[in-house]
Amino acid sequence: MSIDRRESVHPIFQIENLSIAYRGVVALAPVSLNLRKNAVTALIGPSGCGKTSFLTALNRLTDMIPECRVSGRIRFDGSDLYDPITNVLDVRRRIGMIFQNPTVFPMSIQRNLELPLEEHGLKDRGEKQKRVQKALEDAALWEEVKDRLKENAQSLSGGQQQRLCVARSLILEPEVILMDEPCSALDPLSTRKIEELIHRLRGDYTVIVVTHNLAQARRVADDVAFFWMREQTGFLVEAGSREQLFAQPRHPETQSYVNGLEG
Amino acid sequence: MFPSKSDFLLRLTTCLLSWVSALILVLIVWFLFVESELVWREVGVLRFLTDDRWSPSGDFSSAQFGLFPMIVASLLLAVGSILLAAPIGVGAALFAAYYAPRGVRQIFPRIVELLGGIPSVVYGLWGLVVLVPLISAYHPPGTSLLAGIVVVAIMILPTVALLTLSTFQQLPTSLIHSAAALGIAPTGIVRSVILPASRSGIMTAVLLAVTRAVGETMAVLMVCGNVIQAPSSPFSPVRTLTANIALEMAYAMQSHRSALFATGLALMLVVTLLVLIAEQQRGKAGHV
Amino acid sequence: MFDFSSNHAGTNHRLWTFFVWTSGILVFAIFGLIAGDVVWRGIGQINLTFLTDSPTRSGRAGGIFPILISTLGILGLCLGTAIPLSLATAIYLHEFSRKNGASARLIDRSLDVLAGVPSIVFGLFGNAFFAVTLELGFSLLSGGLTLACMALPLMIRSTQQGLRAVPDSFRLTAASLGLSRTSTIFRILLPAALPGILTGIILGIGRALAETAALLFTSGYVTRMPESLFDSGRTLSIHIYDLAMNVPGGESNAYGTALVLMILIVAINVTAGLLARMLLGRHIRLSFHQTRSLS
């Protein structure tokens, strides 16, 4: 299944028969899907339907989970993501990720941002300083923290921490940003800030966001993929542009879900 | 698998070093065995129990390897001290968990930790200077099995109290509340709910404390009098297996040295067994 | 927590309450008695010359300076060996090995047993392996290495607990930023696990300073000032033992030494606590009892 209308336009991820199992139990049945470059794609569906598993397969974070097996094929920017010769650290630099609960490291705001930069070979102080400021500006956090960069990042509010996480991803100049329910731990005001952020990223970055909030998907997404589950196994029901999926869903499950009858 | 060379090196190094850590145990057993091999071959296990005396130097036909009185002393010391320490330790843990005023509950573990951190020679010194004269006034000579039991009981008290306390703290609060809701009186709750639910944890605590009692050397060496004899009363001076090693290793040669290592190996086996049983109990406690 | 101190009728209950209170008070009393005894009898012995002079007349008179130096030397050797080894082992067990894999279980179990080995057995082993087989003789080196073997399981357990307390989200987030495992461990996990690591080091120091039996036939009991790590030297705890048992009239200096030893132990505890608080900006509760159980 694919987002047919725009398939020809630069898919950054080409996913064929991707399936994921934990301890031998299939959590996600084979999925085939293309994801458009520089668009915002929302993955929606009830909890447990494999959205998050799907997302973590895209930057190979599944490698970190014991007894998790991924099969099928993912092409990222044309090359096989799971090829043994793929440099996974480089892939993860190019594909940033924001988690459900903001995870800042217990060090200063500045160190939080510099650490990944240094890891990827940037040593020059002036350049680091410039990139820190730019990332914080892009994440709409600069004004709030510019005078307290040396403070412990854990002293920030939840919403600020999440924006710091976004800044920390952006500082590596990724091509893709994966977001796993980035607003579910945040208050409405912080949620709006993150959504505005997603809007601004559109066009420059590919954003793939998992959300259980249909209104949010409607607000931020260009494309939508709808997952459902049957007997513990998640699967992709359909995917399409936001207008198509919400206005003319092809499957009855999608229809009842987007109209709020189920899930 | 390893996109970064440093990751591969780190994994390799830490893996090798952790095998070094694990190898220490193998080395200990190996050296105890190699050093005592002579005596196992020439003397065998049985003579340790049946020989009349302990005079292990000289050639094997004339030397005597009777460890029996010391085995009895070690056993009585361990049993006596745990009989003393277990009820008080569990009582103290109950006190700290449920009975004491709030402020006391908080400092109690600190105090017990400090008690547990006192070096065993200091316990020995205190026993020798304070406790032994007290016992001697009642029944000379004072250095005795009893002195050893009291000092070792004090030394293992922190182990029993702290481990039991942490077992109590892991009990679900709902357990106590639901018992209280049934109208069971506080004493009843302790005896019919808390203690049975913590049985495995208390067993672990007691077993690990026994391990310490069996292995204790310095304090026992200082207060027990070190006479090789099966005690006729609690006031008899005795020598334990551990004290025997400490006293004689400095000048032991050949068969003598080998016999001391054999004693060490036997101690090691007893302690290993106790630890493995204790860990198994702890595993059970984890599933309550 | 439920409060049991409320009044409740019944002799059974009164007896029980009496038993519990007596046990609790007894623990405080014993601690007061022993600590008080050491302070009371030891305080008169301690002055500057006691710390800076060499012992004379078998230790009845004079000070403990060379003994302090030997103690610190042995302690340094012990920590210098045990800290890297325990960090490496804990890192491997917690960050690399497969959980519940056969090799991790084997290493874990052997550390449990090692923690229970009596100190006199460590003494035998240290004598046979370090002093005789490796030909280090009775020396600070033999003693320090033997103590390192003893302190190792405590320190590994503590570091493991520290690593366990670091949330998994740190590991996943670090990975998602393309950090290598090495950087993740050294720059994020170990700093975050510092309270556990420090607790382990304190426990290790406590165990090493308190140890006597394992040193009798490894470091020996020469009172001279050691000139190198290959020299024999006696620690504070051995000095206490020797004065109390083998030197008639040595008791007062034994108490003086005991007080110095206890002050040293408490001071190291307090310093490490302050250090941890300073480094992390929050109070660190030393999780003593779980690790203690292994000793």
Image (cartoon, rainbow, N blue to C red):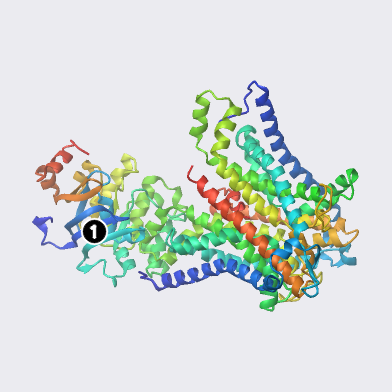
Closer-to-camera residue (C268/A219): C268
Secondary-structure class at tag 1: loop
On the picture, is A150 further left or further right than C7? left
Q: Quadrant of the C terminus of chain A?
A: top left
**Image quadrant of residue A176?**
bottom left
Q: Is residue B33 above or below residue A140?
A: below
Query: Would you call the spot at circle 1 few (<14 residues within 10 Å), some (14-19), or many (20 or more)?
Result: many
**Image quadrant of residue C245?**
bottom right
Q: Is residue C141 visible?
A: no
User: Which residue lies under the disc numbered 1?
Assistant: A205
Location of residue B95 in the rendering, given as x and y in whole percent from the top left corner: 65, 35
Label count reads 1
Q: Is residue B262 visible?
A: yes
Q: Going 66% across and 25% down the picture, which residue do you hit?
A: C12
Dot 1: chain letter = A
Location of residue C19 in the rendering, given as x and y in whole percent from the top left corner: 69, 33
Residue at the outermost bottom position:
C135
Q: Quadrant of the N terminus of chain A?
A: bottom left
Q: Going 52% across and 45% down the picture, which residue do you hit?
A: B285
Location of residue C269 in the rendering, given as x and y in whole percent from the top left corner: 66, 54
On the picture, is A130 further left or further right than A107? left
Q: Is residue C110 above or below residue B201?
A: below
Q: Amino acid at mark 1?
A: Tyr
Closer-to-camera residue (A75/B70): B70
Location of residue C70 in the rendering, given as x and y in whole percent from the top left corner: 75, 68
Residue at the outermost top position:
C9
